[in-house]
Amino acid sequence: MEELINNLKIQIIEALNLEGMTPDEIENDAPLFGEGLGLDSIDALELIVLLEKQYGIKLANPAEGKAIFKSVNVMAAYIAENRKK
Amino acid sequence: MRRTVRISDNIVSPLGFSSEANYAAVKAGRSEIRRHEGTFGVPQPFAASLFDRDVVMAKAAECGIPAGLSLFDTICLLSATLALEGSGVDTRSPKTAFILSTTKGNVELIGEEDVDQTRALLGFSARLIGEFFGNPNPVEVVSNACISGVCAIIQASRMIADGSYDHVVVVGAEVQSRFIISGFLCLKALSDSLCRPFDASRCGLNAGEAAATMVLAASDKVEDSQWEVVRGAIRNDANHISGPSRTGEGSYNALRYVLEASRKDELAFVNVHGTATVYNDEMESIALDRAGLSDMPVNALKGIYGHTMGAAGVLESIISIHACEDGTVLGTRGYSERGTSRPVNVSAENRTTDRTAFVKLLSGFGGCNAAVLFRKGDGPGGEIPAEPELETKKTVRLSSEDCDLVALYREQVGDYPKFFKMDTLCKLGFLATELLLKGEDRTELREDRAVLLFNTSGSVCNDRHFQETVSDPEGWFPSPALFVYTLANIVTGELAIRNRFKGESSFHVLGKKDQAQMDRIIREAFMDGVTRTAVCGWVECSADDCFEAEISLISKKNS
């Protein structure tokens, strides 16, 4: 799980162009949206692409993203359970 | 005072090859919107109104349009040819100009092997139109996302009012492609069934293809039978590059400005954008309500044509003129039950009217919004303020020859992480403007400042990056973060957000860097009664390591 979390952080930083940010700076439990990283609706859509491209997970309804992208921990748990690759 | 009147028009769409045929189809509620599976090789279903290419090419051949052109270039020439037929306009005259309104033109040619890549540039298509009609003037493309068509009509009326031209032919066109459909799919903005503007169950837009042409002429007075372009406005939300404003800010401000020129009780309806996305229609309901128009009949044509993007402003204005002539407020196909927070007077059925004026309203990516008032016969409000004397306050130049954008950002700015999400064109425009406005108080929202930028390559550099994400043999993973930057005018939106500019914002693609042409368009931007200063100039980016900016702060003298 730790490896998945770390890889996920690296993928998020790259996909969302969080320049200058290191994986250590993203807290596992901190909310990804609303505060902290300052992410917006386009970032949420980019995370949907990340799920599909890296883990083969297709979200049928983009509104599901809201619950899944709550924090890195929540996202990693969802990936561990649903990943196709 | 020179007024702008419409002398002829044409629509080429899947519903027919004339404005009359199109209007009859719309009035009868006919549409060519169909569900598509596998079209353009896209692995998800979507609904769209698309041309039958063979039918278009056969009609084009019949009308003397050369063979071997792309579908996009063909419909542009075909629509302009049919609109100009019998109009008496001398297209070879230096007093006649053409404006092309489009967002993506021939974008599907990007990355195609054995295709000259300059054909994918918007300027190529505009030049082709000019050459075909033997027009001696420089090409001009208004590429302002989905509001382009109304912007082109406003631009044309200014070119006529200031005496630059006697006739302006406005051609708005769009064709769909794997590029555009993939982009809207990754934004989750497309519906795979008929779109439902303003309806409670609306779930996204339908894509559309069309070309529409409006021929405008200078006139000393407006005859009873003539339609005048009375007044237009372009306003930015200064809020988000792709999300509509939650307060309807720019749309309301544009509406408010054009309504100042309308007589009480003269409007038959407002023909709105009505894309049938959740956020657009909600935003428009707020803007209309704020403008006191919650009782005004409102209609949207996206349930007939889909979203024809660069053609929409021209096409929907033409249909609205023909509807007024027919005493009709067209119904909104796809609508059944209101699904917006504010009241809007929308109906699925056609209604009757005896009024002969309307407002056309549009909004687009880059936070831009536009409104234009059309009226039949003489009336007030047609005056455009005299051209003011302008002065250049300051100019900043940046070039890939001597500048590393990231290093410059770190040295001069450093506090705007959004910078790293931008494409190179936006980074360039952003940094040049940061240097230009250094020291200026930028905390106040201001409607009196316009942003007006030019180049020849549009957003082609980022277009290539996005195209790679949809043509990757490893899989189809279109990137939403790249797609939102595949419109050249996004840079004007980024500047508006950063600097809180709520005034006019527009992007023009030219055939080449032509200072006289840019100076004329900049002067014309000051014909908007609100504009007092403008950030304007050149932002060209043909590749990530090949760019050039020359941006100035221009002001009315003594202001």
Image (tube, grey):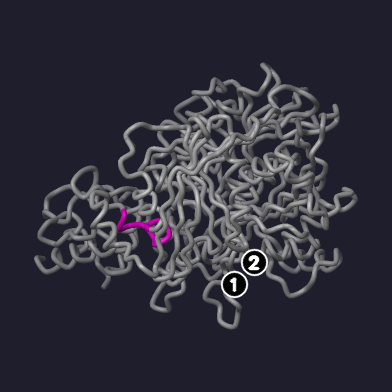
Residue at 28% x, 57% y is B409
Q: Is residue B53 magenta?
A: no
Tag of residue B382: none
| Above/below status of B429 relative to B468 | above
What is the x, y in percent for residue B453?
Answer: 51, 51
Q: Which residue is mark 1?
A: B118
User: For the C terminus of chain A, which image quadrant?
Assistant: bottom left
What residue span does the magenta drawing correspond to?
B419-427
The secondary element bearing badge 1 is classed as helix
Residue at 76% x, 61% y is B77
Q: In this orientation, which residue lies closer to the viewer: B520 or B46?
A: B520
Residue at the bottom extreme of this rendering: B114
Q: Is residue B421 magenta?
A: yes
What is the x, y in percent for residue B2?
Answer: 76, 34
Residue at 76% x, 33% y is B3
Relative to residue B92, is residue B486 drawn left or right? left
Quadrant of the rendered structure where residue A25 is? Answer: bottom left
Magenta stretch: helix, strand or loop mostly: helix
Residue count near mark 1 (Cα–Cα under 10 Å), binned few <14, some 14–19, many ≥20: some
| Above/below status of B438 relative to B108 | above
Residue at 43% x, 79% y is B473
Quadrant of the rendered structure where residue B497 is? Answer: top left
Mark positioned earlier in the residue sequence (2 or 1): 1
Q: Which residue is mark 2?
A: B124
> Looking at the picture, which amino acid does disc 2 mark?
Phe
- Residues tagged 2 and 1 counted as in contact (Cβ below 8 A): yes
How many angstroms separate mark 2 from mark 1 (CA)?
A: 7 Å
